[in-house]
Image (cartoon, grey):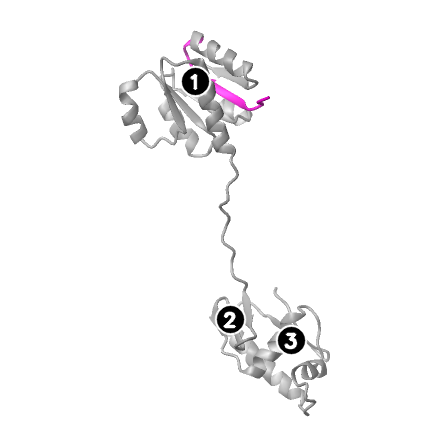
Amino acid sequence: MQTAHILLVEDETKIAQLLQDYLQHEGFVCSVLDRGDLVEPFLATHNCQLILLDIMLPAISGLELCKRIRQSSHIPIILLTARVEEIDRLLGLELGADDYICKPFSPREVVARVKAVLRRSTLPTSVTAPEKPPVLQLDKACFQAKLHGQDLALTAVEFSLLAVLVEQPTRIFSREQLMNAMYQDHRVVSDRTIDSHIKKIRRKMASICPEQEFIHALYGVGYKFEMN
């Protein structure tokens, strides 16, 4: 059974009652208003899934209401009009209506249009926001590192050192651990060599992203990589 709440705005009592009866028979909840100035206050306090909106209304016209509603809502709107000769002009106004029905109409046609518009409005969309590239990209095949899409121009040694830190973010590496990870041939390397490489990497990263520090030094302990 349909459970959508339909707001019918129609000042002709007989038409309003007939459409309400048909919609409720189909399982819809249907509220009826007969003046244009009542619509916006009603929508502010009620959750509706579709509006059947007559163009000729007391106080505020359906055309004006359609424009106002579209400024803040995507709720489906079907216009009801007796102005058959003005349909082309109405469509050209780009009011944002989802459909229109000309009077005189069959109540069954109105119900069918309501169902069709509701189906369209609830179809799942396959459009997804494009994924942002990671802030830091490492390409081990060519020893290339990019920060916010810009090449850091690292040397092979600098790249290897950064890769060790990045692979285990937030882990604190001692200088000895970094040397062992980088130089697996057990060559003798001074602690100061690691400090020098870190300093160069930091300088290159700061030239692209000066407001953020990626490699953090813990005095007397070592270094860690962390995105703040």
Crowd tier of the residue under label 2, counting other residues whose Cα lies within 10 Å: few below 14, some 14–19, many 20 or above: some
The one of 86 and 118 positioned closer to us in this rendering? 118
Discs 3, 2 touching: Cβ within 8 Å: no
Which residue is identified by label 1? Answer: 109
Magenta-span inclusion, residue 7? yes
Magenta-span inclusion, residue 188? no
User: Residue, x 51% and y 48% (percent of image)?
Assistant: 128
Please identify the quadrant where the N terminus is shown: top right
Secondary structure category for the residue under label 3: helix
Crowd tier of the residue under label 3, counting other residues whose Cα lies within 10 Å: few below 14, some 14–19, many 20 or above: some
Which is nearer the N-term, disc 3 or disc 2?
2
Secondary structure category for the residue under label 1: helix
User: Residue, x 56% and y 71% (percent of image)?
Assistant: 138
Secondary structure category for the residue under label 2: strand
Disc 3/disc 2 C-alpha distance (Å): 16 Å
The magenta region covers: 1-13
Which residue is identified by label 3? Answer: 164
Is residue 165 found left or right of 91 in the rendered image?
Answer: right
x, y percent for residue 206: 52, 73
Question: Which tag is nearer the camera, tag 1 or tag 2?
Answer: 1
User: Residue, x 53% and y 39% (percent of image)?
Assistant: 124
Crowd tier of the residue under label 1, counting other residues whose Cα lies within 10 Å: few below 14, some 14–19, many 20 or above: few
x, y percent for residue 114: 47, 23
Q: What residue type is labelled 2?
A: Lys
Which is nearer the N-term, disc 3 or disc 1?
1
The one of 184 and 6 positioned closer to us in this rendering? 184
x, y percent for residue 169: 66, 68
The label on residue 146 is: 2
Q: What residue type is labelled 1?
A: Glu
Q: What residue type is labelled 3?
A: Val
Which is nearer the N-term, disc 1 or disc 2?
1
Q: Is residue 88 above or below residue 202?
A: above
